[in-house]
Image: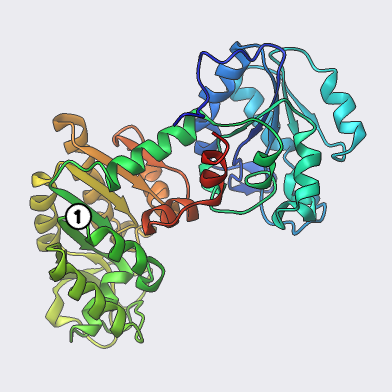
Amino acid sequence: MKNHLSKNLDLKGKKVLLRLDLNVPMENGAITETSRIEKIIPTIKLLSEKQAKIIILSHIGRPKGKVVKEMSLKPISEKLSLLLKKKVLFNNSPLNGDAKFEIDKINDGSITMLENIRFNKEEESNDMKFAKKISDLGDIYVNDAFSCSHRSHASIDAITKYIPSYFGLQISQEISALEKITNKIEKPVSLVIGGSKISTKFKIINNLIKKFDNAIIVGGMANTILKHTGKNVGKSICERDSGDLVKQIFENSKKYDCEIIIPNDVIVSKSLDGTGKEKDINDVMDDEMILDIGSKTILTIEKIINKSKTVLWNGPAGYFENPNFQNGTKKILELISARTEHENIFSVAGGGETVAAINKFEKSNSFTFISTAGGAFLEYLEGKTLPGIKALNQNV
């Protein structure tokens, strides 16, 4: 990337508008998970060391252009201050002359966080005048919010038309990892994909089938395939009107020589809070639901991962929130982690539930790259051009 944030840029005294995604989970005003905050610390430290005046733009939740007290970024500014061990000023002034006046007074190397950018209705409409108003607060713009870059919002897209703009360190790593796993692949390459709905990830599967050697489909998505290939899935999560999608997946897998792997044994229960029983896929009863993959399926997955040099994982294998149905997800995580640590395969994991599982089993250091992005991660894998990335590339 020609316009990435480099250590050679002279930023001393420059006001840097830094767009981050700090949309972290919160309960009763307390932050419950901090991985998104931790990932952007290297960019902030680099800018601070270069004596830039850092002005953070971010959001939390969907306030729909209104001021919502519970969606203030103030608690996040305080958390960031603790993690950086450096004062983060919080400025809740409206984005007008007052905010600009206060920003102009800040010291070199200091950090200021502005209030939730989505409190302004013009943000989500990608309003050009609003983007110009934001750009007037700084000298250069840095986007380090990959997870927001599928949005055509003013602080992601339109702002780049008014101010010199750059990719941040984190977004550069994210794009490099995804490019490597989709375009610069070391084969054999395998996809492990789960989650509840095949319809939401149909385009991803069909895009990656063209490039991957194996597609291991688990979770609710596998139930849909099993249902439409004649298996009884009982009361399981299943899309009963997705027969055409399943047919297309198998047709494309044959066309591009990608093997589709689905469970041949499963863990079933009559309720989500049950204990679980392992069964052959042909023995599922009408009053049972599939909540995890079985031991034979795990062995099949192990053989494939052991032969792979590149692995992409998105989506759990079952209802891992109940410990009785976490074994499949945990084993997949352990298999990929072990291969990454000991044999240097290239592994990428991403998506909200996937990151939740990685954190639950404390394996955050066991992948080559973990994406904290949700929609942007999935849309990139579909082969879409993300507005935030396109805007920056046009700014070269």
Q: Residues within 10 Å of mark 1 (few under 14, many from 20)?
A: many
Residue visible at 70% across and 44% down?
A: 29
Residue labelled with disc 1:
212
Q: Position of residue 135 (x, y in %)?
A: 75, 35
Q: Is residue 200 left or right of residue 346?
A: right
Q: Is residue 262 visible?
A: no
- Res. 321 image quadrant: bottom left
- The residue closer to the viewer here, 287 or 99, is 99
Q: Is residue 163 left or right of residue 184?
A: right
Q: Position of residue 291 (x, y in %)?
A: 29, 69
Above or below residue 157? Residue 91 is above
Q: Is residue 231 left or right of residue 124?
A: left
Q: Which amino acid type is shown beneath numbered disc 1?
A: Phe
Residue visible at 75% across and 49% down?
A: 128
- Res. 283 image quadrant: bottom left
Q: Position of residue 351 (x, y in %)?
A: 42, 52
- Res. 255 image quadrant: bottom left
Q: Is residue 189 left or right of residue 55?
A: left
For the N terminus, the image quarter is top left
Above or below residue 264? Residue 122 is above
Local SS, label 1: loop
Q: Position of residue 114 (x, y in %)?
A: 76, 35
